[in-house]
Image (cartoon, helix red, strand yellow):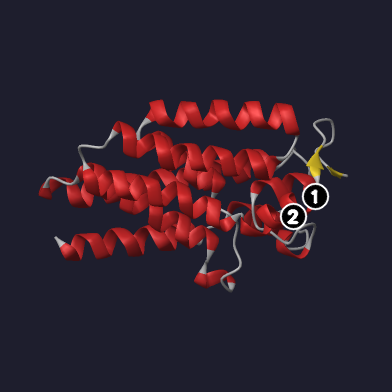
Amino acid sequence: MWLSVLLAVLAGYLLGNLNGAVIVSRLLGKKDVREQGSGNAGLTNFLRVYGPSSAVLVVVIDVLKAVAACVLGRLLLAPYGFGREGLLVGGLAVNLGHDFPALLGFRGGKGVLCGITAAFMADWRCALVVIVVFALCLWLTRYVSLSSILGAFTFAVAYPIVHRQELPAAIMGAVLGLFIVFMHRSNISRLLKGTERKATFSKFRKTK
């Protein structure tokens, strides 16, 4: 079984290295998105730098790699009776690969898109609650980072409650959410200092 776990982790991590924002910015013949804006290889920075016209492809790449990692993890561990845990192993691994991609110099994104995809794969009910929290916070505050943090924290709390009778899965669900919160630690610092920038919905550019 441990060989299957290792395969799920390695496959998920390598899939995570396929960063949509980096791939699309290079396909467009533009500068690496990590050299622009906030320097983050995520959807938000891609939108702010290159606009929404090519962002759909970024979403498709990052969603599909997360789905593939979760499905593969489930397939590998389901024969041992740990299908749900395998799915979450894949979700955690793809997030790790997205955030710290060895093939891209360990400079990745913050895993929000991969995380919400894995959340839907793990439990669509909890994921819908996350979406509601994210959308409400974004509407009220216009802080993408704060919305992502609260959404991730919501999953870290909701998933273990719903799946409290499956301790390994509950723990991994909490870790998935908290890992995304951890990746936003610089945003948390700026939010506390009042220097975090808000998003404008018309052109999706930074504004004070």
Q: For mark 2, does the 10 Å Cα neighbourhood hold few (<14), some (14 to 19), or many (20 or more) residues?
A: few
Q: Which mark is residue 84?
A: none
Residue 27 appears in the picture as rendered: no
Are the residues at dot 2 and dot 1 in contact (C-beta closer than 8 Å)? yes
Dot 1: element: loop
Q: Residue at x 44, y 57 (%)?
A: 15
Q: Residue at x 61, y 67 (%)?
A: 107
**Identity of the amino acid at label 2?**
Arg
Residue 15 appears in the picture as rendered: yes
Looking at the image, which residue sits at the far left? 80
Residue 84: x %, y % from top left: 25, 42
Residue 58: x %, y % from top left: 62, 46
Residue 39: x %, y % from top left: 73, 62
Q: Is residue 89 above or below residue 123?
A: below
Q: Nearer the viewer, residue 62 or 185?
A: 185
> Hey, which quadrant is residue 121 in on the image?
top left
Distance of label 2 from label 1 (alpha carbons)? 6 Å
Q: Is residue 21 left or right of residue 190?
A: left
Q: Nearer the viewer, residue 59 or 171?
A: 171
What quarter of the picture does the N terminus occupy? Answer: bottom left
What quarter of the picture does the C terminus occupy? Answer: top right
Looking at the image, which residue sits at the far front? 192
**Which residue matches tag 1?**
194
Q: Which mark is residue 190?
A: 2
